[in-house]
Amino acid sequence: MTREWDAAAYERLSAPQTRWGRVVVDRFELHGNERVLDAGCGTGRVTAMLLERLPDGHVIGLDGSAAMIEQAAVRFAGDTRVELIVADLTELLPLDGQVDAILSTATFHWIADHASLFRNLASVLSPGGQLVAQCGGAGNISSLERVVSQLGHTFGGGKTFATAEETRARLEAAGFDDIETWLHEEPTTLPREDLEAFLETVCLGGIVEGMADDERARFVHDVAARMPDPLIDYVRLNISARRTA
């Protein structure tokens, strides 16, 4: 969660994440007046969908990237229903009081320690409150990982592509019940002209961070050239649970 992002590029390229986010938002049971945490809000494209469901509610958008929060602040300027916070989901969350529900899309897989993550979320969620989330799961981007390995690099630590069974056990240990977890494949074809920018901004960001500009451009180009199609073999881990009452 402490990785810094190119928020402007992500805003332009995150159509797949936004599409998935709509499905997650639609799974919520909301009355419209709840206080909801968007855990990993990015630039706020999915947060905006959540606000459509909360005409009398309040959203706390939290992200570990200051650049993402700055971009979200432009989107929600003047909207008193939105509070934005830069914070790390692996640490105790700096919230004033509890929330009624937690949303998260395309975020949890960037966190290595899911046991701590779920404990931190449970600590700010009111008893009976909903957690509805989706992130990368077991098998996610496996073809891309093979290409990166062929070029002598690895994705390394700092992320978790968990199974549904592992996630259920971690949620139970953190104090959740009424748990549903499942995986589904979400192969995503990108416009060829956006492939390298998408890889650099999203998939390979943790690898290329710190590379010189020419080295980064060459590496991303080599990865794209080895992909037979501009397709990312995404696998999504879906989560629905409630804080134990």
Image (tube, rainbow, N blue to C red):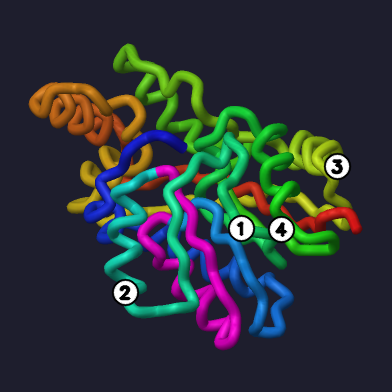
**Category of crowding for the residue at label 3, using alpha-carbon neighbours closer than 10 angstroms: few (below 14), some (14–19), many (at least 20):** some
Spatial CA distance of label 2 from label 3 is: 38 Å
Which of pointers 4 and 2 indicates the residue nearer the eye?
2
Q: CA distance from mark 3 to mark 4?
A: 13 Å
Residue type, mark 2 in image: Ala
Ranked by sequence position, the earlier of labels 3 and 1 is 1
Looking at the rendered structure, the kind of residue marked 4 is Leu
Does the segment drawn in magenta span residue 55?
Answer: yes
Label 4 secondary element: strand
Percent x, y of residue 163: 71, 36
Task: Pick whichever of labels 3 and 4 is earlier in the sequence.
Answer: 4
For the C terminus, the image quarter is: bottom right
Q: Residues within 10 Å of mark 2 (few under 14, many from 20)?
A: few
For the residues labelled 1 and 2, say whether their Cβ atoms are less than 8 Å apart: no
Which marked residue is nearer to the observer: mark 2 or mark 3? 2
User: Which callout, 4 or 1, points at the residue further toward the start of the chain?
Assistant: 1
Say which residue label 4 marks: 131
Marks 4 and 1, how far apart in space? 18 Å
Q: Quick one: label 4, few (<14), some, or many (20+) residues within 10 Å?
A: many
Q: Residue at x 30, y 53 (%)?
A: 10
Instruction: Between residue 139 and residue 90, name the one nearer to us.
Output: 90
> Crowding near pointer 1: few (<14 within 10 Å), some, many (20+)?
few
- From the image, tell me which residue sits under label 2: 77
Mark 3 in CB contact with mark 4 (< 8 angstroms): no
Q: The residue under label 1 is which amino acid type? A: Asp
Q: Which residue is mark 1?
A: 96
Task: Look at mark 3 in the image and give the residue it sits on.
Answer: 172
Q: Which residues are magenta?
A: 42-64
Expressed as whole percent of the image width and height from the top left, the position of residue 172 reads 85, 42
108 to the left or right of 195: right
Marks 2 and 3, the one that precedes in the sequence: 2
Secondary structure of the residue carrying numbered label 3: helix
